[in-house]
Structures are given as structure tokens and as C-alpha cells.
Amino acid sequence: MDSEQLREYGHQMVDFIADYYKNIENYPVLSQVEPGYLRKLLPDAAPNRPESLQNVLDDVQSKILPGVTHWQSPNFYAYYPSNSSVAGFLGEMLSAAINMVGFSWITSPAATELEMIVLDWLGKLLKLPQEFLSPGHGGGVIQGTASEAVLVVLLAARDKTLRRVGKSALGKLVVYGSDQTHSALQKACQIGGVHPENCRLLKTDSSTNYALPPEIVSEAISHDISIGLIPFFLCGTVGTTSSATVDPLYSLGKIAKSNDMWFHVDAAYAGSACICPEYRKYLDGVEEADSFNMNAHKWFLTNFDCSTLWVKDRNALIQSLSTNPEFLKNKASQANLVVDYKDWQIPLGRRFRSLKLWMVLRLYGVENLQHYLRNHIELAKYFEECVGQDSRFEVVAPRLFALVCFRLLPPVGDNEVCRSNKLNQVLLEAVNSTGKLFISHTALSGMYTLRFAVGAPLTERRHIAAAWKVLQDEASTLLGAPLQ
Ligand code: PLP
């Protein structure tokens, strides 16, 4: 490592990145390249001799950026956001600079201790119950993604149950969520050895705004018990992926508790908003949960990846995930004086991710973060109003946070679902191929639904107005032209 070269190249790179952000609006937000485009542009093999940074950056500009979908563009409204920020970026830089691998406390005590402190800070901001904080039996840990978070707690819950009922009962274990629960739960079941037929994704509908009705969960559990199965894990969501609905945490938690089940709350997207007192109500009932997850890398200005997970009983995780090979033994770990995060996650190695969350919290402060979240929610309200004022469109699910689910109505007299779905699919493709905005879709009650998720840090009201104009213009073109 040559410090002077780092200084020179680092400045060059920061300039390149700053220019990228300055011009980000000028790129088509959704990459318009065809599959396989890059192989045609790059050599077949790595260079024998070093190349200049300038050459590489020229290639990034001319060959890589056309194949990038610009998640940080103010015109990005697809999926859910994945925020970057100056503070998050600086935290990433520092983490890359220190580049330690903090699997055990001894491998970099500051990394473990800062993670514990920062997760306690964030846990307090979310007003999580005391049991989730590190001074007791629980604590927080940064996972890479919400998918890893649900996997590790599912493994902990599985093993806890198997210790009670016997290892041979694995095939009888049952998991519950809803048809709105993120597919990460299904993947966790696959990895965790849950029988494929024992992952119950209970049906929801518009009568509960796609939230999971507790009665349906109770019925399913009672039925499964009556046929000799063993319910062990229930997942509730605060801010589902399709429509950002909120499951009734308190009732679900009570059901889980009375059946000796683990209750996990996935607030990957909407958890961030709950640092605002007026949105904290959506976490009511979290006191009944065994684990709680929020992605700071979605809507909390912390660059990917940073998924924060809290558990009430850290020993449950450790019992499932710990190993103690000779080559990792050290005094502090052996004396049980420290947290070794390797025992709270799947991989051994781990990055110094708490630095970026710490920098976000310190460089912005809680008030600015709250303002940031509220502003996006206001912008989403504005978009919702625009949709509401155009009788050709309808909002199809209540907006709780910064996601608006909507669709273009078919021409009067045409109620055929297939044609209506096709109409919206064509609209989505037309809008996205302009490169002026990027939205995504989902299905709600079999209806092709457009999703407009406000949450990119650079989005302003003028961007929303421009996006809405594109949607309206494309709709006019479509409704004037017959569908193919
Ligand atoms: N849970 C919810 C509610 C989500 O919306 C998402 C992704 O959008 C996930 C889980 C999965 O997130 P990750 O990519 O962090 O695994």
C-alpha cells in the first residue's frame, strides 16, 4: 500500500464519483443495454501489464455506466430504495481502509464494541423493548441482508424447538407467514431443512389490506397441531414488499407465545420510518417478538449492506451458529467476557459495517433523519394525490409510508382482468423504456399493480411531478392505441 498513490488515486476517484452524482439525473435510470452487451466491449483476458487509473475510469464511463441501473438517481422509484449518503459513503471508505475481519472480539475489539453500541442507539431510537438491547440477554447484530437475518433466527428457532421435542421431529416443524411475506422466508425454510410443504404462506386479501388476519393463523396452527405437526416459527411484517402493509404484531405475537413459537418481525423497509414518533405505532406489539429486523441500507441513508437484527435471547443464536476451532481460541472468548459475532451469523468473516451506521447517526443526527423520512412520505402523498386526481387511474392499496400502489384503469366497459393486467404491464414497460423514471410492479389479488416507491435521497417534488407527467403521457398514448 503506497499512501501517496492512494492519496492521488483516491482524489481522482472521489472526483469521478462526485461528478457521477452531479450528473446522475442525465443517465437513463433503468439501464437500456441488451443481455451480454459487456462481453462484446471488454477483452477476453486480464492485462499482463498494469494500466492507468484514467484508462479504467474511461472504461467505467463508456462501458460500465451504460449497463448500470442508477439506484441513486432521483428518478428511481422501483422495488424499495437502497440509500447512499455522504456519511454512509465515508463510513464505507473508512471500513475499506481499516479492512479488518471482525469475526471475534479479539480480531478488532472496536468493531464488535461499536456494533453493539450503535445497535443499542438505533434500538433505543426505535423504542425497542429493553430485552433487545445488549446489556441484558439480547442484543443487536448487523447482517448483510434481511434474508440472512430471517435465516439465522429461523435456525435458532428450529434448534430451540428440536431441543425441546427431539431432533427426529425436523420433518414435522411448521413455519407461518403470509402470501405477502418476503420470499426470503421461503428460502430460509429451504436452507433450514423445513419440509417444503410445511412453510405456510397464509392467504391475505384486500379486506384486511393484505395484512395477515390472526384468526387465520390460529386456525392453521390448531389444524397443524391436530394432525401431529409442530408449529415453531411465525413471521410478521411491518411494511410488506408488495404494498407496505403492516401485520397485527401484537395479536400474532400472542398467538406465537401461546404455542411456544418464535415470532420474527421483518421491518426491512418500513422500520426506518418508525424512528418518527408518529410512525412508531406501527411497531406496537414488537414487545411480543423474539427478533426484529430493519434494513438500514434501504431507507436510512446507510450504504448497502447493513441489515440490523435484534434478538431477545442471544444464546439461541449462539447455540445454533457457534463453532470453537482451536485456531480461533483466545483468552477473552474462552473466558466468556466478550461477544464474538461469528456466532451470530452464517459466515466467519465480517466487515466493519457499524462505522457507516455510526457516521450516519452522528453526521445527520436524529432530527435530520426524521425530517428526511417525513419528506419522502410527503412526496409519496403528493404522488398519491396526482393519481387520485386523474380518473383514468386508481390507487389500489392504502399508502402508509412512501410507497404508492396504483394502476391504470381499463377503458369503460372492459373489465376483463387479463386485458387490464396487460394494459398496466405495457404501461410499465413504456414508462421504463423512456429512461426518465423506473418503477416496478407486483400482483395484488391477481391484479397487475404498479409500485411507486419514493425514497432515493436526491428525489425532490419536481422529480415526482415530471415522473407523473411521463406516466400520464404514456397512458394517453396507450389508451389511444389498441393493445397488441
Ligand atoms: N423483507 C422485506 C419486507 C423486503 O421488502 C425485502 C426486500 O425488499 C426483504 C425482506 C429482503 O431484503 P434483503 O435484500 O435485505 O434480503
Image: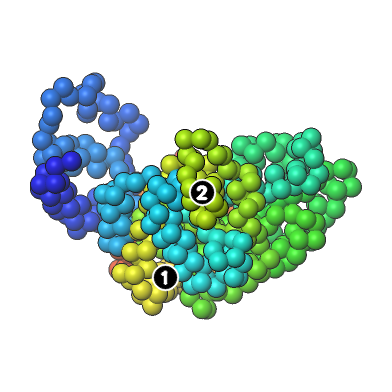
Q: Is residue 392 visible?
A: no
Q: Is residue 170 visible?
A: yes
How packed mark 2 is, by other alpha carbons closer than 10 Å (few <14, some 14-19, many 20 or more), is some
Give the residue displayed 87% in from the left and 43% down from the top: 228
Q: Does mark 2 have its CB less than 8 Å from ligand 1?
A: no
Residue type at mark 1?
Leu
Q: Quadrant of the N terminus?
A: top left
Residues marked 1 and 2 touching at CB (< 8 Å): no
The way the protein has been coloured in the rendering is: rainbow
The mark closer to the camera, 1 or 2, is 2
Q: Nearer the viewer, residue 291 or 467?
A: 291
User: Which numbered dot is residue 373?
Assistant: 1
- SS state under label 1: helix
Q: Does 410 sit left or right of 19 as displayed?
A: right
Q: Does 443 sit left or right of 199 as displayed?
A: left
**Residue 448 in the image, given as x and y percentages of width and height:** 55, 50
**Residue 350 in the image, given as x and y percentages of width and height:** 42, 45
Residue under numbered circle 2: 333
Give the residue displayed 55% in from the left and 60% down from the top: 139
Mark nearer the N terminus (1 vs 2): 2
Label tally: 2
Q: Nearer the viewer, residue 254 or 34?
A: 254
Q: Nearer the viewer, residue 452 or 49?
A: 49
Residue sitting farthest toward the right: 226
Give the residue displayed 70% in from the left and 45% down from the top: 158
**Residue 206 in the image, given as x and y percentages of width and height:** 66, 61
Residue type at mark 2?
Ser
Q: Nearer the viewer, residue 355 or 64?
A: 355
How packed mark 1 is, by other alpha carbons closer than 10 Å (few <14, some 14-19, many 20 or more), is many
Q: Does 58 sit left or right of 385 as displayed?
A: left
